[in-house]
Amino acid sequence: MNPSAQTLGQLESARSLALGDGRYYPTIIPGVMPIIGANANASLEIRRWGADFLAETFASPTWPLDAKASCALTVLATLKEYLDVVADSGVIRSAVQAAASIYPLVYKHIISDPTDTQHWQFMLAIKSNILRRMDSAPPGVRICCVKFLQQVVLVQTPGMPPDPRRPEQIDISLALVPRDHPLIPYANLEAEASGLLDRLLGIIHGDHSDALLVTATLNTLGMLIQRRPVVTNKILSSVLNFNPLKLANSPMTPKNKVIMKSIERTTRALLVNVMKRNPEGPFNGRIQQYLERMHRMRLDVFDESNRKRPAPAEPTDGLDTAKRQRLGAPVPNLAPTALSAPPLPLGPVSFRQLFTLNPDGNTANFDVQAFKDPEQLLRILVPVLQSIDETKLGNSINAVRSRYLALSKAVPRPTIPAAVTVDDEEEYEPDFEPEDAEQAGSKLDGISLDTLLPQRIRDSPLAPYKLPEAPPLTTQEAQKYGEMTVRRAFGMLSSIGEPSLKAKTSKGGFNRLAASNYDRDSWVTILSRLATRASAGLDDPDVGMKSEFDMKKASSSLSEPIRDELYRYIIHDWKKRIDVAINWLSEEWYNDNVLASKVFSKGATNGNGASPSTPKGNYQRCALRLLDGIITYIEGTDKVLVRFISEIPGLDIAILSRMKKMAEDPERIDLAIMVLQYLYMFRPPARELAVDVLVDMWRTNDRAKNNAKKLLLRWRPEALNEEEGEGFRTDKESAHGALEVKAT
Amino acid sequence: MSVDPRLARSRPQQQQQPTAVPPPPPPPPMALDGASDPADVVPDHKFKLKFCTICASNQNRSMEAHLKLALAHLPTISFGTGSLVRLPGPTAHQPNVYNFNSTTYRAIHSELSSQNAQLYTQNGLLNMLGRNLTIKGYPERFQDWIPGKPRLDHAEDQGAAGTEAGVVDVMITCEERCFDAVLDDLHNKGGRLNRPVHVFNVDIRDNHEEARVGGHAILDLALSLNDAAAKEREVFGDGGWERGGGAAREGFDEKVPEILASWQERWPSLPALWSLAWV
């Protein structure tokens, strides 16, 4: 047994002691250091053991940080020597591991002892040695350097402020460093940590063939995210921009496959860990999306690799990939007449189906339009045409021909026996699938052969298309369309609905704006003004007013159709639309008077527009028509008639005689009397008229006699006397006179 | 120094002797067939990586692999990542559930054999438990493991030699769920030892037959890895650093993807994953 082995045995027993109880470390280290340490000139075996021991010792969870910190200072020289002198990667690996464990300890020591320049210089030398190795060392060492970097970033980034209640759980971070520390300036440390973190993150975006380094880095980030919230954002942003399947474009060697899968899985584990630790984290949505995207990409990449091999190593001679394995066999014999063109489907057939002999082949989905450049197409097409097997082409043509014949004969086409192979098409088509091939194909499928035919000529440019000019409308047509428009306007009017009772506002009168909004009232005003004023004065006044029912003779203007519609609209629900009726009739009356005054001003200037001598306008016939319409439906209790009669602007004997007529129905006598009474009381100009009608009623209607008599006793007792005797007349007359004075 | 293969073969049995607790009713037949090939035994003077096998319950797959590696004289510990130890019960809806770290294999064995000896003999559970109790005392939960905590109290376990410091170089999980759980837990543990660890997954279905095949595959992987690591030591040692060049100077760590890829070609039915993590 050589002396080295003997020494190793001793060292091993010392280690066992420490493993048995961590409290022995502070006493064992001073004993071990002279053997393994600097200036000991130890053999490689001893140094390897020493480096491993230091790494193990300072990582051990079995003894407290304080004790470790003081011991750490005593081993700095040895670590530095290992890193500077020894060229064994095993030693270096362990030395870097030990340095990663020791750096936070020395750092903390320097925070509390700002004067200890010597140890800090040692630490800095070790640090710069390790950082130098980051780019050049063998990967096994570099991963340990990555871990060292992580520790530097960890302690030189601000963490949580120390919790005085739990002094044993101290988190060594930049938060412990005073701003004015002479040895380790806060700003420098922070900047260095930021730079080193960038370097770490640069690794995962670098070369992925070095999966060792990439996964090693990814696996260091979890702890930084967890313990240093200030850099969480930066790290996660970087990771979420990271593509674990970067190698998907390189050849799918078994090694690359393993690497890709592993990097992807490692990334996933990291992100899932972040989400698990912080279920409410602001990043979780993005992480979730990223993971889903990655999952799909992974399926794509690995399915693709199963389905399709990467670039073929051997020339394929234009053969289908599926046949490459059969290259050894005589290729021409492989495509015999074994396969025949499938029968066309029943029903309309597209050109595409007609010419497709092998619907399953790749070429069936090939869209030639993918070639934007005709030159390119030519370069492909010419050699392809040259390489076509003549007999196969002939067979194919025959197959299509027979299909076509079968189709054009329009016989029911069961199967078309075609002695043609399917593969030949594939042979002279390049292996190229445009992305939208399927879409183009399905588009073609949708068009049947018949509809396709006229559309095939596409060479000539289309002339601008002009609609043929419509023939001029005849008067009747114009009228018809005008009426349709009016009906539509009224259809809209009924869809607006009735105004609520509360919405009654002051009336606009004749000078109001026809419409300032879109309610029913506005439309009614517009329509009634259209009916009355729009064509006012254009018609021959003698033609238009022969009779209230003479609609046929109406001019070509819109007035009459609108009036008809207004009438229908009102009658449809006359109880509610009595205001519409009053509005409309007021407009009619106004228009009539305006027209009449113009006629008068032309001739004479005696200017009484309301003169009864004015030729009748539209008002009277409209009012009568409406009244007749309403009276048909009216009942004895419908006091709305009182309102109607009293509010329409003009009354004459013809209108009021309708009351007499209405009173022939015994149930409506009271209502008729009431109307007349109201007119007598509240429309003095119509008083005479009302009394005349009442007298008439009294004379002709026996049932109304009593009621009429009561009123006539007061209003015109002489009328009663005419019939019954002279005695009454004078008394009543005086009474009547008194009443009359009172009423006015 | 060469090793007599016969000695190597007898060694594990000698190690078993002290741990040979009163033998359970069905003697473990599998304990003998693990390392039947003497070439699979790594001589003690050679460099050895430290291994850790992990499955859900630390009963079937990880224990089969644990045994295989231990019989090859590789330092091995094993864990389960589940929340509880779950074993098949009388029906699919009534599994037998035990706590990790406290329930011994022996206790489970005796409970199941008193429950329904015939059933659990028939489905191989008692056989498996009988094997397990010769390997170590109780199922251990990965998440409760403190890396770097000395395992001197596990000295009786098979494969314990070399694992005293409570660290490992290689972890091998037996299904993707466990792989994910291990990576996740290592993030939680925070890599306080600053020590790299290669984590592998070898997808093995949870039954006795697949576990046996998987055990062989894992042993194959472990031997390949250990071989590469040992070569690195040899090349770099003895002034090899100066002499070596090209591939010879390539270290163990960077060779791992290649080793795994060629292993995957040998075992195409066991899809593999890998990551370099930290304990």
Image (cartoon, coloured by chain):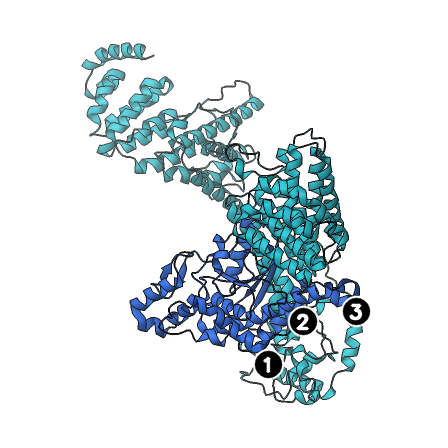
Chain colours: A cyan, B blue
Callout 3: few (<14), some (14-19), or many (20+) C-alpha neighbours within 10 Å?
A: few
Q: Earlier in the sequence, mark 1 or mark 3?
A: 3
Residue A231 placement: quadrant:
top right
Contact, mark 3 vs mark 2 (Cβ under 8 Å): no
Q: Could you tell me the amino acid type at mark 2?
A: Phe
The spot of residue A474 in percent (x, y) is: 58, 50
Q: Secondary structure at mark 1?
A: helix
Identify the mark nearer the N-term, 3 or 2: 2
Q: Are discs 3 and 2 both within one chain?
A: yes
Task: Give the Cα distance between marks 2 and 1.
Answer: 24 Å
- Residue wearing tag 3: A376
For residue A366, the mark is: 2
Looking at the image, tell me whether mark 2 or mark 1 is earlier in sequence order: 2
Q: Nearer the viewer, mark 1 or mark 3?
A: 3
Using the image as rendered, state which of residue A5 and residue A502 is in the foreground.
A5
The residue that mark 1 highlights is A407
Q: Is residue A669 above or below residue A420?
A: above
Disc 1 packing (10 Å; few <14; some 14–19; many ≥20): some
At a point 37% along the width and 60% down the height, the residue shown is B97
Q: Which of these two is toward me, B234 or B259?
A: B234
Q: Residue at x 66, y 72 (%)?
A: A309
- List x then y, in percent, for residue A386: 78, 82
Quadrant where the N terminus of chain A is found in the figure: bottom right
Q: Chain of mark 3?
A: A
Residue A315 placement (x, y as % from top left): 75, 78
Query: Does A309 sit left or right of A635 as displayed?
Result: right
Amino acid, disc 3? Gln
Amino acid found under the numbered disc labelled 1: Leu
Drawn side of residue A75 relative to residue A560, left or right: right
Chain ID, mark 1:
A
Q: Are marks 2 and 1 in contact (CB under 8 Å)?
A: no
